[in-house]
Image (cartoon, rainbow, N blue to C red):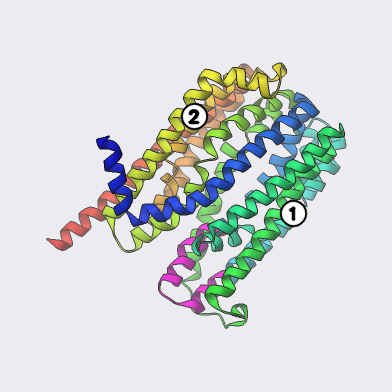
Amino acid sequence: MNLLKKWQKIWQEDRLLQGVVRNTGYLFSSNTITMVLSMVQSVLAARLLGVAALGVLGTITVFASTVNRLFSFRMGDLVVKYFGGYLEEHDLQRAGSLIKVSLFVEMVSSLVAFFVLLFLAPIAAAIFAKDPSMTVWFRIYGVFILGSLIDETSVAVLQVTDRFRSQAVLNLVQSVMTAMIIGLAFLMNAGLPLVLFAYLTGKIVLGFGGVFLAFRSLRRVLGAGWWRQPMAKLPPWQELARFAVSTNLSTTINLVVRDSEQLWVAYFLSPLAAGYYKIALAVVNMVVMPITPFISTTYPKISGSVAVKNWKQLRNLLRRVTTISGVWTALSSVGLIVLGRWFIQFMYGAEYLPAHPILLVLLIGYGLANTCFWNRPLLLAFGKPMVPFYAMAVFGLIKVALAFIVVPAWGAMGEAVLLSGYFVFSVGWIILAGMRELRRGEQAQLAVEA
């Protein structure tokens, strides 16, 4: 009871936490429904296609996303940091100029990514799908890059302007549309093309919808015709370029080391093994998805606290959101440990049971990353984007090197062990570095006050 009263008092007094939880609530409500729909999509696709074809589906979607993000400069991070700061200072002209630069850079990088995908599609079909005839489907799905031409900038604008409710509704709409098309494919006993079309439709709806909402929000905060305003003086191009390139490098490391797991499994093993791995990741996503909204809602608050040097507020925020994410991660992980095997058999069928041990190993790494989801945003707020990059680069290089030895010998389980180990060491390093920056800030403030 005392603990309950303590948290009730904290909630009543902490306006920052209330704002984070309120905005997270919009996305969480949407993500909860989206998670259910994603699970339904996953189950229907798995039962319709079978393990091997499901593995091919995973390689197509992951490859396209990987190429797209490979050329991304994570303009969303730059927009949150600089655009948000200009709005706080009521410098609307510089805010508009920053957005125009971000839109141009992202548009060019997305077009480059699309044409690179068209060129690499035959190679990807042969290496990952083990079937050159799949080239056309790699290219067709790649059209989503054009639908997400300025997606990162748009999403960041919605975050900075507190348009989380609109973002949640859009996420829900695209999930419903995707689920409906996959449900139709299941009823028609259709094959891979219609399932792939379902995912493509969802991506395009999300991309165009985000642009519409973002431009409406920009009109509200910057005024009509903001894009016609002359360019204002921005921070030195070297500073913006360094920030963008560093976040791009971090994204590249994540793509190679963390987000292309199915491609690695398909490369070393087979689409069948990739199918098992895809199911394990889908189930782990049940643990990750409810916490994911905290990343986008917490980062602007962390950045704001660092900007005004309110270290007590920042430390309280980190402590409290970590408690929330940690409790959820622990409870859901225990549930999957106890019931995971039964859940996979009931939902997907007995043929997918080899995914269960993979799932248990993945929970270790994802559990830590999920609990301390704020690790990288904290260092970005301190203007230290290269620290996460170095951590991910060092342990990522070790992971990739070991993969050539471990995965052929241990199979998909070996890839899961390497990924969890990567999370434990890289996230742990980033957390320590972030807390060190926080202590330095606190000590500097004490020195000034003394």
Residue shown at the point (15%, 62%) measured from the top left: 449
Disc 2, SS: helix
Q: CA distance from mark 2 to mark 1?
A: 38 Å
| For residue 36, side relative to residue 448 (left or right) | right
Q: Which residue is mark 1?
A: 114
Residue found 74% across the figure and 52% down from its top: 144
Residue 91 percent across, percent down from the top left: 45, 77
If the image is split into quadrants, where does the C terminus sit? bottom left
The residue lying at 66 percent from left, 28 percent from top is: 279
| Amino acid identity at mark 1 | Phe
The residue depicted at 51 percent of the width and 20 percent of the height is 337
Asked whether residue 406 appears in the rendered view, the answer is: no
**Residue type at tag 2:** Ser
Secondary structure state at the residue bearing disc 1: helix
Membership of 28 in magenta stretch: no
* Residue found at the very far left of the displayed protein: 450
Which region shows up in magenta? 75-99
Q: Quadrant of residue 181?
A: top right
Q: Which residue is mark 2?
A: 332
Q: Is residue 140 above or below residue 421?
A: below
How many marks overall? Answer: 2
Q: Position of residue 299 (x, y in %)?
A: 44, 54
Mark 2 / mark 1, whichever is N-terminal: 1
Q: Position of residue 435 (x, y in %)?
A: 32, 45
Foreground label between 2 and 1: 2
What main secondary structure does the magenta stretch of the protein show?
helix
At label 1, counting other C-alpha atoms closer than 10 Å, the crowd grade (few under 14, some 14-19, many 20 or more) is: many
Image marks 2 and 1: residues in contact by CB distance under 8 Å: no
